[in-house]
Amino acid sequence: MHSIDIGTVEMMLDIMKYSIGRISNTNPDMGKPTKEEDLLKLVGDTVTEEGIGGEKAFQLFRDVLSKAAVPVDHPRHLAFVPAAPTKAAILFDLVTSASSIHGAYWMTGGGGIFCENRAMEWLVSLTGLPDKSFGVFTSGGTAANLSAIVAGREYWRSLDDDNKGLKALLITSNGAHSSIKSMAKVIDADILLVDDEKNEKLTRSALETAIEKLTEFDRKRLFAVVATGGTTNAGIIDDLDGIAEVCEKENLWYHVDAAYGGGALAAPSVRHLFKGIERADSITIDPHKWMFSPYDCGAVIYKNMELAANAHSQKGAYLDIFKDEGAQGFNPADYQIQLTRRLRGLPLWFSLAMHGTNKYTEAIERGISLANFAAQQIQHNQNLELVREPGLSCVLYKRKGWEAEDYRNWTYKNHQANFALVTPTKWTQDGITETCARFCFINPDTKESDIVEILESMN
Ligand SMILES: *Cc1c(COP(=O)(O)O)cnc(C)c1O
């Protein structure tokens, strides 16, 4: 199974050929969801006692199964948060697997972790956090948020022995990502959702009022505030500076979830909107969203790495050796929830090293210009209406007269036609929740004409 024969060589060539073809194809078929039972009819049993052979298994994947998935890098895939990994990053994802490096400890992962750390230095520099702030790559924003929240909770517990027996409480906004609510469940913390509806975001005054209204008991168990640096639905950035002020005054852990929006820290046209992010205790950024890395790659950054290590460093008799060989290196396992880990930052490093950071700035600015272009088109079309000004690269808009069902039918029709994937969302204004359409631009290869054609499909 691990040795090489002629068949294996042929399969390798097949796979390389497919990979090169797929990486080079900037306009892949959309792919459609297919029922599992229908796929089973098409491919039959694939895991058998004797094996069906690499050639056959690969052919089934290439010709049938890969077509039942939607490629996130399609230039007219503007739903959810799409992705557009660079060719360099995808190729280096293959190299990452081929290199078989264990990325938990410097002892075994040193050369690879070195590369990750150079990419991390760039991310940290974008945040403006003080010297000695640093971070690690995680499987995504969810794992980064969990790692950060756990670090904050451990810090709070260390402040006062009484806190150890309390159920922790954190404040975030309605616009925060669902993973914040889920991760609060994982650590068995309560969550209070605070909003300032008039301003569509979490503001300093809304946060102050919410804290003032807490009972003495709840104030005691409040340990953190999670602000969002670009909401997933609308690209809205909370009042990061004002929230920092409150967190410093109240001695609360301040986490900024910029999983989607973090890429825009590299975009001069919008960087000022993030003022105050440099005062956070921890920050989440997802390179697999707006920094052109393949799935999956998130990042968690801390102002004080020691506090992260206090929460996450794992102890075990057989792990001690990892710290003892004298290289005195950086151990990513000490700063997030995972032990054995893929070197998820390697593809980002290679792509950054190859292209330089200016190219990243350009590609991210392109997403913002596309959003502004779309907004103009919508404003000039009498059938359409902007719900709000674009937030980063998100555009929410309505087709006059349409109900939820019309948006859904339109989405399905465009998808079935292999034309575009644009999905509806919901937006609440003045207490009224309505369905609307949403663009999220990530891919710099999306063309203005794509936007025009998609808008025309609503006529
Ligand atoms: C996408 C997203 C997450 C979750 O990240 P995953 O990488 O999907 O785990 C968290 N927060 C925000 C703001 C996001 O946009």
Image: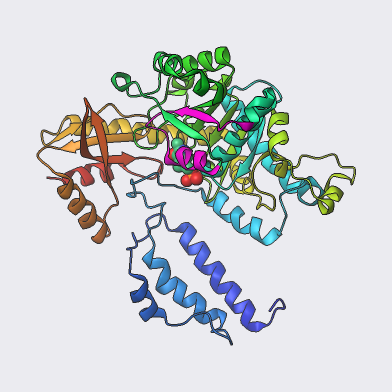
* Residue 76 percent coordinates (x, y): 32, 49
Q: Nearer the viewer, residue 375 or 186?
A: 186
Q: Is residue 107 visible?
A: yes
Figure quadrant of the N terminus: bottom right
User: In the displayed structure, does residue 310 sit left or right of residue 92?
Assistant: right
Q: Nearer the viewer, residue 415 or 212?
A: 212
* Residue 78 percent coordinates (x, y): 33, 45
Q: Residue at x 78, y 46 (%)?
A: 315
* Residue 27 percent coordinates (x, y): 37, 56
User: In the displayed structure, does residue 129 sit left or right of residue 72?
Assistant: right
> Please, which residue is most extreme toward the bottom here?
50
Q: Residue at x 18, y 53 (%)?
A: 409
**Residue 247 vertical placement versus 335 (above, below):** above
Q: Which residues are magenta?
A: 165-186
Q: Is residue 176 magenta?
A: yes
User: In the displayed structure, does residue 374 sit left or right of residue 326?
Assistant: left
**Residue 20 vertical placement versus 106 (above, below):** below
**Residue 186 vertical placement versus 372 (above, below):** below
Which image quadrant for residue 318? bottom right
Q: Is residue 302 visible?
A: no
